[in-house]
Amino acid sequence: MSEQITPSIVVPAPARPEGSPLANIKHIIAVGSGKGGVGKSTTAVNLAVALQKLGAKVGLMDADIYGPSLPTLMGSHEQPKHIESGKIAPPVIHDIKCMSMGLLGQGTPAVWRGPMASRAIQQFLTEMDWGELDYLIIDMPPGTGDIHITLSQSIRLSGAIIVMTPQGLATEISQKGLQMFQQVRVPVLGLVENMSEYVCSNCGHHEHIFSKGGGAEVSQKLGLPLLQSFPLDKKLLEESEAGTPVLVSRPESDTAKLYLDLAKNMAAELRSVLGGARKSNPTVVNTEKNDTHGMLKVAWSDGRDSVVAYKELRFQCPCAVCVDENTGVRKIKKESIKEDIQPVRINTIGNYALSIQWSDGHNTGIYAFDMLRKLLVKEI
């Protein structure tokens, strides 16, 4: 199979913040699911290999700290190595840079609370020498939890893919995944349906074991593209357990071609989303302090500029220290805020919020873009 770059497989991306350890990664794509056992990890691994076969530079990160499957699916337990820069070089497996808790040589399961798992994910992102990549594919843990929040707050995800099966609960489960990504403003590029049907290897008879058209039905209901449907493939299961992706073991098979099409469809949808084909809420593209007048200027992705007074912004802090979580009553009094209050540092949180460190030492507030947009008292 040719490894020349397929047109449009490499999608241009906005620059990441200068000095970021991920500055040389064009796109970070999360592959998630509302529940386990739907073939999410198999999808992530074979999508990564498909992108690489089409000519992209690809990394693959296993974010499932408690049940890592990347070493098994990729057929290697090679450990990462420390390099002269002080960073860690991820092992290269099937021409893909890989990182997983399962590659650290620990034979016992991780019995960690959420914050410890989140710190491990932070290390995978910031201490690894990922180099220049067109795509970093992240195999997310099933469901929603601390790791999902950590990733959404730590990095700018270009998009997410939701993996599902055709059962009757698919819509409800997929809806939860969609809502989670929507809350943190990560565009969901589309759905992948696994186990759509069974094809008999002897006679070629097609049997819908679960339900027919489940992926298309969910796609229509959620308003998301169905990027690809995959039938049950006994050989794919055997190859996965043996650690050989189908694009390596059977590159000319129908299943391999479906994964190549998935990669192309994902890239096309990503290009469409970045090009503004989908309507999305405005995001913050820049902030500018004016300490003389005590105002913060915010530039939005829709071309508008707005301003808000520092004192008002500090007063409206949404954190639990400033607002009672049960009653919604504001604990902080506006008269207690000094007139010369000002932001010391402003950071972007993922795709959806700003965090502000204030001159009075307060730094726990996360200002969601939607909330910030409502606070702004003047549009320029």
Image (cartoon, grey):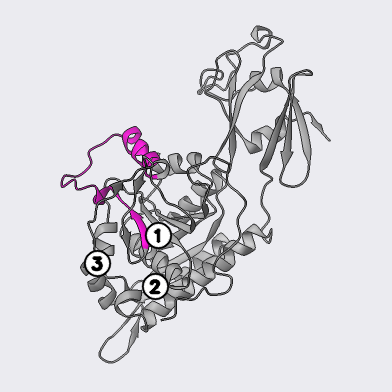
Q: In the image, which residues are magenta?
A: 96-124
Secondary element at image label 2: loop
Which amino acid type corresponds to the residue marked 2 in the rendered image? Ser
Secondary element at image label 3: loop
**Alpha carbon separation for disc pair 1 and 2:** 11 Å
The quarter of the picture where residue 375 lies is: top right
**Alpha carbon separation for disc pair 1 and 3:** 30 Å
Residue depicted at 67% across the width and 33% down the height: 372
Residue depicted at 42% across the width and 51% down the height: 130
Closer to the camera in the image, 317 or 104: 104
Which mark is on residue 169? 1
Which mark is on residue 211? 2
The residue to which callout 3 is attached is 243
Q: Nearer the viewer, mark 2 or mark 3?
A: 3
- In the picture shown, does residue 233 fall above or below 16? below
Residue 9 shows up from this direction: yes
Mark 1 or 2, nearer chain start: 1
Residue 197: image x %, image y %? Answer: 36, 77
